[in-house]
Image: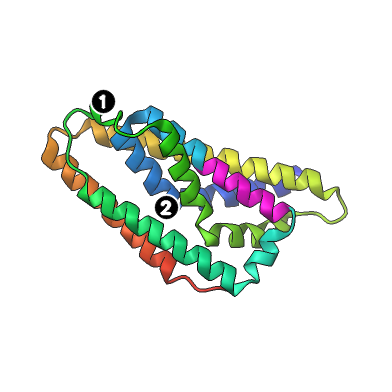
Amino acid sequence: MTFEWWFAYLLTSTLLSLSPGSGAINTMTTSINHGYRGAVASIAGLQTGLGIHIVLVGVGLGTLFSRSLLAFEILKWAGAAYLIWLGIQQWRAAGAIDLHTLAQTQSRGRLFKRAIFVNLTNPKSIVFLAALFPQFIMPQQPQLAQYLILGVTTIVVDMVVMTGYATLAQRIAAWIKGPKQMKALNKAFGSLFILVGALLASARHA
């Protein structure tokens, strides 16, 4: 893989990671409600889920999955239901003036697992990776090394972008002065979760 080819993938991966989705919403929500350490656990969970998708694509299951309408539909509806459930929970969350106290309400392990599930139940992710990776693989060169390069690049880029979202969320949290603002913010992010869940439910198999 040439540097130019890798750089083209880097730009593509960066643009895709910057696009707001369930991962970004989950990261920002966690950062505001559970502090930066909670966000770190959430980001680690997202990258674990992404890594599992990359491995599945690497061993060929991604292509098999992308061709299976039943598998796509099952994962799609599971993911949509989970995101909508998260949105309802976020909508109902009480406001809190002391974010440091709120940060203790969920363990980082639980936030980590939640983030894994958010990524794993997104069928568009694995279908997209299965379609994108082959476009940047040079058949005349060792494929395993190229898959590793693309996989590591994907995870590092997404980790950096999600860290940026977490930092932005911390700045937003600094503006919160009372429980009413916190409730309004929780409702806003809850609505975004529900919206993304609805969009996922409306997605069609390519």
Where does residue 31 sit, x and y in percent of width and height? 35, 35
> Do the residues bearing badges 2 and 1 touch, measured as CB atoms within 8 Å?
no
Q: How far apart are marks 2 and 1 (CA)?
A: 24 Å
Part of the protein shown in magenta: 46-58
Q: How crowded is mark 1: few (under 14 residues within 10 Å), some or many (20 or more)?
A: few
Instruction: Tell me which amino acid carries mark 1.
Output: His
Residue 192 counted in the magenta span: no
Q: Which residue is drawn at 77% across and 46% down?
A: 146
Give yes or no for residue 57 being in the magenta stretch.
yes
Q: Is mark 2 on a helix, strand or loop?
A: helix
Our reading of the magenta stretch's main secondary structure is helix
Residue under numbered circle 1:
100
**Which badge, 2 or 1, is on the more N-terminal residue?**
2
Q: Where is residue 128 in the image (x, y as percent from the top left)?
A: 59, 60
Q: Residue at x 42, y 52 (%)?
A: 22
- Most distant residue in the top direction: 100
| Quadrant containing the C terminus in the rendered view | bottom right
Lateral position of residue 150 relative to residue 107, left or right: right
Numbered badge on residue 22: 2
- Residue 1 visible: no
Where 189 sits versus 178, above or below?
below
Q: Is mark 1 on a helix, strand or loop?
A: helix
